[in-house]
Amino acid sequence: MNAKNADAATTNALDPVTKTVIWNRFLSISREMSTIIERSSQNFVTAELHDFCVGLFDVQGRSIAHYVGLPGQIGAGSLQVKALLKRFPGQIEPGDVFIMNDPYKGFGTHLPDITLFYPIFHDDVLVCLAMARGHQEDMGGSLPGGYFPGAYDIHAEGLVIPPTRIYARGEETPVYEFFLNNIRFPDGMRIDNAAMIAAMKVAERRLVEMLDQYGREPLLRYIDDMIDSTECAVRKEIALIPDGVYRTEAATDDDGTNFDVPVWVRCTLTIKDDTLTFDFTESDRQVSFVNCPLSATYASVYSAVFTALSAEISSYHNEGSYRPITIVAPQGSCVNPIYPATVGAAPISMGTQVLECAAEALSKAVPKNICAAWARHYGCGLIGTDPRTEERYVFLAHVSDGGSGAIWGYDGWPHISPWVCGGELVRAPVEMLETYYPWFITRYELTTDSGGAGRYRGGLGIYWEAVNRGSPAILLTGDSDGDVTRGYTVLGGHSPHFFNKLTLTPLGGVETQVRAHRQAKVGTDDVLIQRTAGGCGVGDPRERDVEAVLSDVVNEYVSLGRAEGEYGVVIDPTTMKIDFEATAARRAGAK
């Protein structure tokens, strides 16, 4: 440390410029970790879809910086760190690596989401822990992929790993080989974990540089101040929201065992001064498959709250952000299940409903601050053999998701769902899909009239069609939802006029629908079609700018019929010009 830094370290005063530099360096470390994982991993879900997250935590388990990743994963990372520190008190050494996915002993989300932690020391003192979490293609269980309903208990879904040391002082432990020997794609998992460990080691190097530069105690004081500053900023934002009590509910189609019986999440939000309390006591009891572990419930609530706050603080959330928020989730409910309940569909199915309930409750207080519901997630898992390599594959086909909900002032974004992923889930190019898997994509396009109408229109959904060029396969729709349920609108906006739908058509056969949370057989040359609805609208559609409606029609986002029927805008189909007189009359007649 140079003389200037040494002098600064001796005073209790915290320099605001230095604080800003340190804060953004933490965020930069997270971004660098993310980039390393993205460029080094081999798992399709991680490398192409970006289904992973990273974070930095102190020795109290407090989140310091979590700039990059899926909000449905990272929001509850603090719970996992605290579980790790409790399991290994005073037993963590330099070079150790810990793994976990257990929803009950390690606050995991669901079993495919593997979390690694790497301790960061400075002068033999544990200072921080780096985290990296990624969705694996398989964790054992009766079927690959993790998204299969009907499992007897969580052990049938795959390996359940409490906080466990897999590297001791840099050396691999035998227990790691045991884990790898009990999953179907061990090489892929080893490579992905190596990428995550490499990312965390880079975080170690960067953080040690900061510790050397600023000194350990001064840097820890800045971390304390960062967390306190964030808490203050969040409380100021919440204080702007009107006090009140708001009740909402949302349902998933079913739990994959009791077909066609919706499972309900119910929330009562109490806003008082600068605090928020989300009470899920009236939610349904735990069921099968779609249960949302407590960590995923926390993450979904945090995601809803943060989207309602100012964008100016969106990059700076940390442990302080959580302090004004209380979450009540009774044990044994579908939003806080108890062992050995299955949780394979979380955080997609029930996590979405938790997020929708929290967001809709906030929209009742500040309707112009939060978006309408996004399209329900509609993916599927395909398990088969690739004749090009004679190797097994798991294709988690997150290819057809619908759009986001609109927000006051802006239309929704197309093809960006699910909401619990916050727009971070990337769609792989067709060329990459056909390289990885024996499926030939024949259509992939936005669907006209799929977005919910409104003064601000919901983002569009997708029509996706592909042919199985591989061996007979198994289709799993466990990570799908929205065949019969959907989310909420805001300020008189409309929902999409159709639901999600997946169909299979055998060669020369009849098209048949396969509902969410089901399983089906797929033959060679069978055609799979996914049609997804868009996001919900905000505001009265007849208040939408007429030129915006015309633009939607020209771009085939909205049909002529719906332009007139829902938006009250009459367009001449020959000239494609607005009939302003007829439009005024139609809009006036609808009032």
Image (spheres, rainbow, N blue to C red):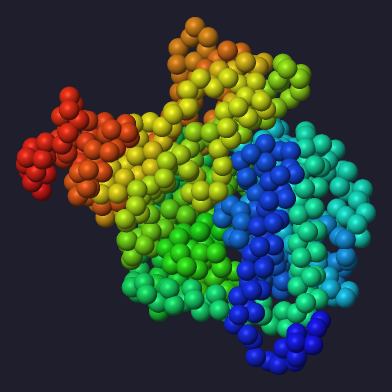
Comparing 385 with 87, the one in front is: 385
Q: Residue 464, relative to residue 75: is it above or below?
A: above
Q: Position of residue 58 (x, y in %)?
A: 72, 71
Q: Residue 90, relative to residue 303: is it above or below?
A: below
Q: Using the rendered view, name the quadrant where residue 184 is placed.
A: top right
Q: Is residue 332 visible in this depiction of the protein? A: no
Residue reaching furthest to the bottom: 11
Q: Position of residue 204 (x, y in %)?
A: 79, 64
Comparing 257 with 104, the one in front is: 104
- In the rendered structure, the answer to whether residue 311 lies left or right of residue 225 reads left
Q: Position of residue 585 (x, y in %)?
A: 6, 41
- Residue plotted at (48% across, 54% down): 354
Comparing 171 with 68, the one in front is: 68
Q: Is residue 196 visible in this depiction of the protein? A: yes
- In the rendered structure, the answer to whether residue 344 lies left or right of residue 36 reads left
- Residue plotted at (56% across, 68% down): 316
Q: Residue 184, relative to residue 19: is it above or below?
A: above
- Residue plotted at (88% across, 61% down): 95
Comparing 208 with 518, the one in front is: 208
Q: Position of residue 409 (x, y in %)?
A: 31, 55
- In the rendered structure, the answer to whether residue 112 lies left or right of residue 88 reads left
- In the rendered structure, the answer to whether residue 543 lies left or right of residue 324 reads left
- Residue plotted at (80% across, 83% down): 2
